[in-house]
Image (cartoon, grey):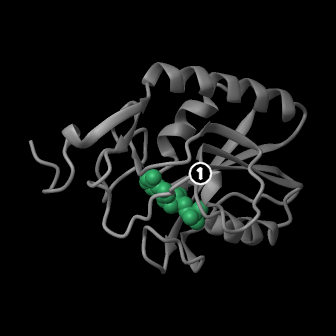
Amino acid sequence: MGYYGMATKDNLEQIVSKEEIQKRVKELGKQISKDYKEKKLVVIGILKGAFVFMADLIREISIPLQIDFVRLASYGNLMQSSGEVRITKDIELNIEDKDVLVVEDIVDTGLTLQYLEEVLKLHKPASVKICCLIDKKERRRVPISVDYVGFDIPRGFLVGYGLDFEENYRELPGIFKIIPGYEPEGFIPSDK
Ligand code: IMP
Ligand code: MG
């Protein structure tokens, strides 16, 4: 079974197992439930990458919440976020006076989230916080604050658990690193 002629499963190295993810998602859910007690929580997922993480996370949150999604498209090279982002699917709920928690797969340069946060604030929510599965904070170009982080993984191109390489591998239950040399064209690895 081929993966459209690119990296195969042999080129992947598992770095976070399904069990480790499950444990961490439980902890995040517990913390969020505590922090948002008595608040009007709206969880907004960024499609497509965050959908698996968000589906698990909301089921570990024990307080009432609503969900919505946005879909963003970057004008720049997919591997090097240009910061020129546009919304191709907007939120549908009214978030005025609500406490918004944005769920993202990976925060890399931070440009995508910086833009989204600005746009969401135009809707006058009571608060906006960010929860990401993976933080690549060594690669940050703008000082965005991430409030909840699943895992700090500074190096490598990652797939699985919703994350893709040219739309493949989203279905894998763990998080995998593409072994060096098989990463997407244009990917600039962090040398730290
Ligand atoms: P940035 O923070 O604006 O640079 O953009 C981060 C986005 O780039 C994420 O939402 C992912 O879609 C994508 N991305 C960055 N690193 C990876 C990776 O290792 N695997 C898959 N997608 C990635
Ligand atoms: Mg993304």
Q: Is residue 109 above or below residue 18?
A: below
Q: Nearer the viewer, residue 192 or 7?
A: 192
Asked if residue 29 is positioned above or below residue 149 in the image, the reply reads above
Instruction: Identify the residue shown where x is 86% and y is 54%.
Output: 127
Residue 24 locus on image (x, y percent): 61, 25
Query: Quick one: quadrant of the N terminus?
Result: top left
Q: Give the secondary structure at mark 1.
A: loop
| Of 146 and 34, the residue lying toward us | 146
Q: Is residue 48 visible?
A: no
Report x, y in % for residue 65: 73, 38
Q: Residue at x 56, y 77 (%)?
A: 86
Query: Is residue 20 shown left or right of residue 163?
Result: right
Q: Amino acid at mark 1?
A: Lys
| In this rendering, position of residue 177 left or right of residue 38 | left
> Is 62 in front, or is 118?
118
Q: Position of residue 134 (x, y in %)?
A: 57, 44
Residue denoted by label 1? 136
In the displayed structure image, the side of residue 147 where residue 155 appears, left or right: left
- Residue appearing at x 83%, y 51% in the figure: 98
